[in-house]
């Protein structure tokens, strides 16, 4: 029988692992799928962490995570990308080897940060840095949205692991805000696709000094 | 006894100026314009009278009143500058009634009048201020309104000149503010008196920094070398009555500010600090005079002459501080008196010259000396007044500037006898420098007067010039008369201002020597009368025949005349190392076979050395930094995200 | 419950844009709602500020002197921006630039945007604060993308991505604060998610964690404030938005974000037992922003970007003053007022120029003084005020700032002073070429007529000057220091 603590570790590992895998994926659907999977682990983590704490409300929170981050946002992104006939192949600024090198650097940095505090969870710092590096290294719009969502997952993981028990109303508010953000980004990405016929941010470099 | 009418008078003066600044908002009609400028003249007239009355009453403004919550102060120093400012402003505003009418198509008249009043208001505020806050407030008002006045005609070159002026004056104001704040220990609303107390106990390094900053701030405003470059650009570009105010009065505000700090705020400063003041003063005087000699633009020439005169004033000021630091009280007092006297003298003759230049430019539609000439025949009375002013500018006796320079030099000579070797050396440098500048100034003014007023007209317009209208000419006459009067009354003025305590009768004293302006004037009058009488007696009017000049039967033309460029040639030759002036003569043959029959054009190029050595590298560096910074905005969002990440990491790394 | 009432009214205003039938009705309704709500809040704010201590509101919301001060500023800018929008959007609709649905979207989002700003100001709950701050971004993104042109969509994309990143980092920082409170003071997360609770238990927080938390909050929310180098979105977004919205973005949203950072500064200071550490961060970012803005402004080619960089500069000045200690805080309060009054005015003027010239490139705009004399004069006056020419309120604040600065950090202050000169040169150079330059422009068509926007600009001009004069009086000094104090002591 796997104990609750094991589940907890498993979900944490999954959260990080799927996010790591998503970085290397060159195809959009795969990226979205991995994001959904890592969010699923976050939902699971929410449940186990709150059970470990002996609270029940984590369940609702996990439900929210599931509904918004596992189902709704990935679906919206996949839909928007499909509607816009976005090229499913995304481009990198860096070669794959460099990409992994950057990811390793991010993880190392997160490890160093988390090492300074016993209570600051490694996974959330790592996710924030991974999200940022995803946004820096990729050239397409959807990766930026996903990168933002990965960062957001990292922050949520901080809330779940380190703080825990954030009031439901606040949780829901944050979910709604994040979802609204993702929606606005999706709508905007549609505009970009319409205007430029591409989802490549390289075209979005008109505004310079 | 505390005569409240003085305070009322000051309030009335300020209120009238404010009203004159506001009135043009209500319309640009001719009647309203006249009303505005007359109001301005009346207000400034009241201001000047109040200043004089304050001296007569013996400066009884013990309890300083407040305007809009700002306390005002009035002591001998500010009162004498207040008189100077308001008297000149009064004449200038009367002059501008006629002057601006004639230029209405070039300037937005309403804005011009309002800004003029604002400009004067700012200068009044500078003199009345008791705190750094109100001082800087007025200072900025003065600077910004004069910035707009410089570009009043909206021509591209005026705008360029205005912007150059703006950056210099803005940097200067910043330096002054920073210096004040160092002295006051950060107390923003402390008065100058309190500042003096904090400054007493401030560390030496802080006082030195404050001294350097304020010297830069005031020095750049006064047009000291090497911060003077904006001045010959900005002053001539402004309408002439504004040039008169800027050169005649605004520069004195810088002088006043520095004097005020030296006299009542700074703790006694060491002798070494005054040497840069003296050095920059002398260098400005020399370079100002040299450039005035080679300049061919009437108003620019006058602007360079202002640099020269301000240089002299700062030399005197530096000498006063130097003398004080070296325990030579007699020289210190005399030099201070000379500064104030010279400031008044310069304000009078320079504003007169600029107003005269305005009238001439109005008549001839050019500022180029090479297109003038022969004006003395066309406008004899006016030219006479200009001659008087020019003589005033070269410190000829019996005019006012002579008195100040005599007072100064005589005391320096006296002090040389008494002092230690090093001090002697410095004083000798000052003495020879001032004397040298005096010679150069004569050269410049002779050139100005000779080329513009004598000989044959060099252009169509010059040959048809008429005496300027009364509104334009009588302010110049008034200034000419004042130049003489100030010289005559110099001892009385200085005694009243409290700079010369031990005077006897109407004489300036210097160590063992004394000089009575009235006897100088009498002497000159006697010589003049003698010459006229002698000519009457000894010349035989019947045998004198008036005929045009003989030139071997050829007609005389203006092409044969000495030009302004040629006139300055010896000076350009002697000082070519300092001036970097270059004359290019290009010959274009008219007859292809004969190279001697050619049309020659000469162009005179003056490249200020320090423009390339000092200003250009700074400008290039700033522009380079700006260009590099702009490259940060490359439009790539990933780069921007990376910047955020870098900022985060850097802050974490540094701050923790 | 007062904040909730206000939010409901603003929601109604937003809804009215979709209820109204014609474009005219949309504008009239928004005008009515906007002025009523705005003036109402302004009245409340003034009475709260002048009438003595204010009862803090319980629950998620709180109110102290600084809150009411900020709310008053928001209300002022709201009213003026609504009025200017009525004119601006009307003109663009008539020219066929904006469709009816876009007009509805415009006004709907305008009111929502104001709602989020009020919420961010009144929020005591960290969740509410975070939501409303992110809400300001979301509400304005579609406004930035309003014109559906290439560049405006690009600007909107950069805006939402960069600001969302910032806000997310900010959230991480806030959670770190909560974490520190949960660990150090034993508060439950629900209790700790409140600024007042954090503040009350500040001394029990772990200092190292608080430092980390503050840096995350500072960098995160600082992105929204527009500190260099996190400012990259700002000139893009502010220059591509319809001018009245640019006015709100520049004039007040940046202040709101800065206000939020200041709240956390209060907590961090109380926890660290001194202001030196946080002041250092403010000083550095303030100075960097001032210097960078000077470099960007020197060769600026786009007048709306010029105004945006000027906002970066002024945020830098505020941060620099804040970094100088208590007097500096007071100074920055004056500066906030001055900036919130003058910057919107300049954007309104820029909007009028844009309507007439159809371009934001400085080199294509010449002879504004002849073609649009009223706009030109008001714009010039505003420009002088923003450059801190007396009698601007900004002159008072910058004077005070330099006073304090020379005392504590003479070198840095001198650098800031030089930058201010460069900025004055850069901005005046650009603007004089716009106002007076003559480049083969056609003879003026109809002479410019006085319109609503000019009225608003004039009121702002007078207000900015009035505040400048008033701020030097003792009564003002008391009130302003009370506002500044509320950031330090009460919460």
Image: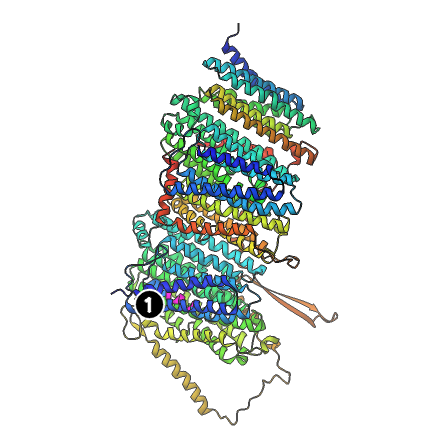
SS at mark 1 in the image: helix
Where is residue B631, by image quadrant? top right
The answer to which image quadrant residue A67 occupies is top right
Q: Chain of mark 1?
A: B
Q: Which residue is mark 1?
A: B411
Q: Is residue C125 magenta?
A: no
> How many numbered marks appear?
1
Q: Position of residue B210 (x, y in %)?
A: 38, 51
**Residue B188: image x %, image y %?**
36, 49
> Going by the image, does C197 lie left or right of B445?
left
Q: Position of residue B374 (x, y in %)?
A: 56, 78
Query: In this rendering, does residue C448 appear at all?
Result: yes
**In front of the other: B586 or A29:** A29
**Residue B545 higher or lower than B111, as above or below:** below
| Badge 1 density bin: few <14, some 14–19, many ≥20, Cα 10 Å | many
* Furthest residue toward bottom: B542
Quadrant of the drawing holding the N terminus of chain B: bottom left
Camera-nearest residue between C409 and C29 = C29
C136 or B390, nearer to the observer: C136
Q: Which of the two residues, C396 or B511, is positioned nearer the viewer here? A: C396
Query: Residue at the right extreme?
Result: B593
Where, by quadrant of the figure, is residue B139 drawn?
Answer: bottom left
Quadrant where the C terminus of chain B sits is top left
Magenta range is B82-89
In the image, taking residue B226 as reference, residue C242 lies left or right, namely right
Q: Residue A72: x and y, percent? A: 61, 23
Query: How are the residues colored?
Result: rainbow
| Most frequent secondary structure within the magenta stretch | helix
Residue B634 visible in rendering: no
């Amino acid at each position: 029988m796997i104990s609750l603590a094991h589940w907890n570790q498993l979900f944490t590992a999954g959260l990080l692992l799927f996010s790591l895998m998503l970085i290397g994926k060159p195809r959009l659907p795969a990226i979205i799928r991995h994001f959904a999977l890592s969010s699923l682990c976050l939902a699971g983590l929410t449940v186990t962490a709150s059970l470990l704490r002996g609270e029940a409300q984590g369940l609702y929170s996990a439900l929210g995570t599931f509904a918004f981050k596992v189902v709704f946002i990935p679906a919206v992104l996949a839909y928007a990308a499909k509607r816009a006939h976005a090229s499913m192949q995304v481009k990198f600024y860096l070669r794959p080897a460099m990409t992994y090198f950057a990811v390793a650097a991010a993880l190392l940095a997160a490890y160093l940060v988390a090492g300074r505090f016993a209570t600051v969870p490694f996974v959330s710092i790592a996710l924030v840095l991974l999200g940022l590096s995803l946004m820096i290294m990729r050239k397409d719009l959807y990766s930026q949205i996903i990168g933002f969502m990965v960062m957001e997952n990292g922050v949520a993981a901080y809330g779940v692991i380190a703080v825990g028990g954030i009031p439901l109303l606040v949780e829901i508010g944050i979910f709604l805000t994040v979802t609204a953000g993702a929606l606005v980004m999706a709508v905007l990405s549609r505009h970009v696709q319409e205007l430029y016929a591409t989802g490549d941010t390289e075209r979005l470099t008109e505004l310079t000094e | 006894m505390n005569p409240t009418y003085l305070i009322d008078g000051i309030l009335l003066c300020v209120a009238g100026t404010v009203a004159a600044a506001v009135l043009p908002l209500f319309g640009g009609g001719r009647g309203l314009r006249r009303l505005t400028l007359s109001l301005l003249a009346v207000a400034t007239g009241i201001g000047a009278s109040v200043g004089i009355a304050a001296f007569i009453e013996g400066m009884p403004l013990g309890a300083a009143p407040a305007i809009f919550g700002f306390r005002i102060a009035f002591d001998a120093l500010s009162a004498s500058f207040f008189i100077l400012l308001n008297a000149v402003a009064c004449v200038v505003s009367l002059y501008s009634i006629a002057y601006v009418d004639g230029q209405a198509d070039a300037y937005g008249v309403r804005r011009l009048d309002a800004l003029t009043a604002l400009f004067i208001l700012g200068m009044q505020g500078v003199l009345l201020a008791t705190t750094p806050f109100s001082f800087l407030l007025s200072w900025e008002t003065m600077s910004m309104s004069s910035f707009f006045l410089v570009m009043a005609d909206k021509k591209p070159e005026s705008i360029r000149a205005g912007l150059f002026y703006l950056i210099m004056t803005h940097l200067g104001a910043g330096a002054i503010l920073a210096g004040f704040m160092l002295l006051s220990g950060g107390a923003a609303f402390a008065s100058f008196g309190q500042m003096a107390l904090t400054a007493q106990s401030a560390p030496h390094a802080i006082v030195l920094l404050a001294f350097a900053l304020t010297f830069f701030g005031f020095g750049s405003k006064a047009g000291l070398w090497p911060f003077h470059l904006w001045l010959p650009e900005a002053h001539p570009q402004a309408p002439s009555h504004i040039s008169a105010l800027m050169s005649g009065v605004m520069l004195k505000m810088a002088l006043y500010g520095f004097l005020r700090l030296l006299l009542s705020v700074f703790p006694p400063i060491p002798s070494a600090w005054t040497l840069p003041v003296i050095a920059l003063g002398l260098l400005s005087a020399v370079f100002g005079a040299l450039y005035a000699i080679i300049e061919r633009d009437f108003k620019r020439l006058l602007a360079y002459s202002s640099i020269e005169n301000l240089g002299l004033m700062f030399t005197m000021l530096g000498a006063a501080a130097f003398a004080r630091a070296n325990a030579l009280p007699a020289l210190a007092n005399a030099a201070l008196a000379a500064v104030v006297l010279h400031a008044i003298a310069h304000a009078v003759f320079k504003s007169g010259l600029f107003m005269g230049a305005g009238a001439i430019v109005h008549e001839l539609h050019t500022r180029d000396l090479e297109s003038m000439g022969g004006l003395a025949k066309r406008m004899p009375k006016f030219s006479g007044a200009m001659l008087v002013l020019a003589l005033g500018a070269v410190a000829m006796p019996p005019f006012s500037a002579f008195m100040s320079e005599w007072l100064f030099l005589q005391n320096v000579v006296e002090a040389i006898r008494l002092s230690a070797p090093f001090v002697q050396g410095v004083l000798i440098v000052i003495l020879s420098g001032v004397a040298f500048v005096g010679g150069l100034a004569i050269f410049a003014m002779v050139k100005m007067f000779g080329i513009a007023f004598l000989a044959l007209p060099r252009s169509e317009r010059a040959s048809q010039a008429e005496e300027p209208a009364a509104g334009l000419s009588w302010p110049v006459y008034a200034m000419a008369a004042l130049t003489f009067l100030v010289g005559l009354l110099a001892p009385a003025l200085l005694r009243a201002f409290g700079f010369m305590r031990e005077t006897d009768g109407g004489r300036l004293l210097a160590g063992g020597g004394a000089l009575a302006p009235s006897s100088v004037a009498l002497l000159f009058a006697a010589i003049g009368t003698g010459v006229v009488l002698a000519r009457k007696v000894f010349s035989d009017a019947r045998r004198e025949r008036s005929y045009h000049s003989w030139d071997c039967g050829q007609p005389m033309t203006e092409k044969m005349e000495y030009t302004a460029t040629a006139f300055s040639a010896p000076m350009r030759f002697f000082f070519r190392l300092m001036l970097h002036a270059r004359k290019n003569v290009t010959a274009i043959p008219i007859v292809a076979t004969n190279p001697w029959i050619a049309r020659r054009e000469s162009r005179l190029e003056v490249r200020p050395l320090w423009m390339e050595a000092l200003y250009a590298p700074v400008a290039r560096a700033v522009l380079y930094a700006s260009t590099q910074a702009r490259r940060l905005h490359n439009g790539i969002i990933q780069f921007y995200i990376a910047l955020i990440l870098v900022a985060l990491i850097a802050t974490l790394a540094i701050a923790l | 419950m007062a904040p909730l009432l206000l939010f409901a009214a603003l929601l109604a205003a937003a809804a009215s844009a979709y209820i109204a039938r014609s474009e005219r009705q949309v504008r009239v309704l928004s005008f009515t709602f906007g002025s009523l709500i705005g003036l109402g809040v302004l009245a409340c704010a003034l009475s709260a500020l002048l009438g003595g201590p204010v009862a803090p509101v319980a629950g998620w919301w709180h109110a102290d002197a600084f809150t009411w001060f900020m709310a008053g500023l928001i209300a002022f800018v709201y009213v003026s921006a609504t009025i200017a929008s009525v004119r601006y959007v009307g003109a663009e609709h008539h020219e066929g630039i904006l469709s009816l649905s876009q007009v509805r979207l415009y006004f709907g989002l305008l009111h929502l945007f104001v709602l989020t700003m009020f919420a961010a100001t009144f929020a005591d709950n960290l969740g509410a604060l975070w939501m409303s701050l992110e809400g300001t971004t979301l509400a304005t993104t579609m406004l930035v993308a309003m014109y559906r042109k290439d560049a405006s969509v690009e600007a909107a994309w950069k805006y939402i991505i960069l600001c969302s990143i910032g806000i997310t980092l900010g959230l991480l920082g806030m959670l770190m604060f909560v974490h520190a409170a949960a660990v150090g003071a034993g508060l439950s997360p629900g209790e700790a998610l409140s600024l007042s609770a954090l503040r009350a238990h500040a001394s029990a927080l772990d200092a190292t964690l608080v430092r980390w938390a503050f840096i995350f909050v500072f960098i995160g929310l600082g992105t929204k404030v527009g500190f260099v180098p996190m400012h990259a979105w700002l000139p893009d977004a502010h220059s591509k938005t319809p001018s009245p919205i640019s006015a709100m973005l520049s004039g007040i949203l940046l202040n709101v974000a800065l206000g939020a950072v200041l709240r956390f500064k209060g907590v961090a200071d109380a926890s660290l037992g001194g202001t030196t550490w946080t002041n250092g961060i403010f000083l550095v970012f303030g100075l960097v922003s001032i210097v960078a803005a000077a470099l960007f402004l020197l060769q600026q080619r786009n007048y709306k970007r010029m105004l945006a960089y000027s906002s970066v500069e002024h945020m830098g000045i505020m941060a620099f003053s804040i970094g100088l200690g208590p007097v500096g805080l007071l100074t920055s309060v004056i500066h906030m007022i001055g900036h919130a009054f003058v910057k919107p005015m300049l954007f309104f003027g820029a909007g009028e120029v844009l309507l007439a010239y159809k371009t934001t490139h400085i080199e294509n705009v010449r002879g504004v003084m002849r073609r649009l004399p009223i706009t030109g004069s008001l714009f010039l006056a505003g420009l002088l005020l923003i450059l801190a020419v007396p009698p601007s309120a900004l002159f008072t604040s910058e004077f005070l700032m330099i006073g304090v600065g020379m005392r504590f950090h003479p070198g840095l202050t001198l650098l800031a002073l030089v930058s201010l000169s460069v900025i004055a040169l850069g901005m005046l150079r650009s603007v004089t070429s716009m106002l007076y330059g003559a480049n083969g422009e056609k003879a003026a068509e109809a002479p410019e007529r006085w319109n609503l926007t000019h009225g608003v600009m004039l009121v702002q001009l007078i207000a900015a000057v009035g505040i400048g004069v008033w701020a030097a009086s003792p009564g003002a000094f008391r009130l302003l220091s009370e506002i500044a104090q509320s950031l330090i002591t009460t919460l």
